[in-house]
Amino acid sequence: IQSSTSLHIIFNTNYTPPGFFVRLIASLGKHRKCMKGSFHRNCITLFFGNVSIGKLDQITVSESLTNISVSVTRQVERVNYSFSSAVKEIHSILVESIEKVKQWFPYITTQLAFVCTEERCRSFPDHYVVIEP
């Protein structure tokens, strides 16, 4: 099993705007390589890849009060398509989807970030390492 570190979408409002999560899932779901998976109250699993050859990666999108997290998992190695390449392609689709959704929320700004896990920061509250666009 291969798994990516969760990428977080954080907001200038310090909370996830109502409706952003649902619109993001709808936008991701419209992409030709994304297929329906399982749905839970605040967590959606989509499948990414080529269903005709049975080679799919799992995208998990979870909503919390302050952010949306996205992770990618691969259960079985795919020949001719590295996990790194899949994650980069999913990242690109995610950025595109975020931009589409932001048109509904002109008052917000978003950033993509990882939770800081540096040893010297363990005594501080959780905080993020922001990825520059």
Image (cartoon, rainbow, N blue to C red):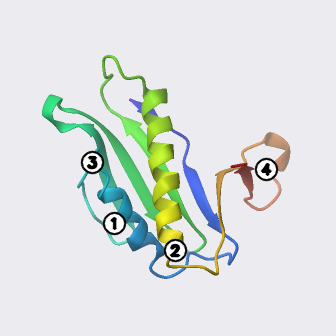
Residue drawn at (82%, 58%) of the image: 124
Disc 1 residue type (three-letter):
Ala
Asked whether the residues under the numbered discs 4 and 3 touch, taking CB atoms below 8 Å apart as contact, a structural biologist would say no
User: Depth check: 120 or 73 in front?
Assistant: 73
Q: Please tell me which of labels 3 and 1 falls first in the chain.
A: 1
Residue drawn at (53%, 53%) of the image: 95
Disc 3 residue type (three-letter):
Arg
Q: Please tell me which of labels 2 and 3 falls first in the chain.
A: 3
Q: Secondary structure at mark 3?
A: loop
Determine which residue is flagged by label 1: 26
Q: As drawn, which residue projects farthest toward the left?
A: 52
Dot in front, 4 or 2:
2
Q: Please tell me which of labels 4 and 1 falls first in the chain.
A: 1
Dot in front, 4 or 3:
3
Between the C-alphas of marks 2 and 3, the distance is: 21 Å
Between the C-alphas of marks 2 and 1, the distance is: 14 Å
Above or below: residue 32 compared with residue 55? below
Rendering coords of residue 51 (x, y %): 18, 37
Determine which residue is flagged by label 3: 32
Between the C-alphas of marks 3 and 1, the distance is: 12 Å
Dot in front, 4 or 1:
1
Q: Secondary structure at mark 2?
A: loop
Between the C-alphas of marks 4 and 3, the distance is: 41 Å
Disc 2 residue type (three-letter):
Gln
User: Depth check: 32 or 79 in front?
Assistant: 32
Above or below: residue 5 compared with residue 20? above
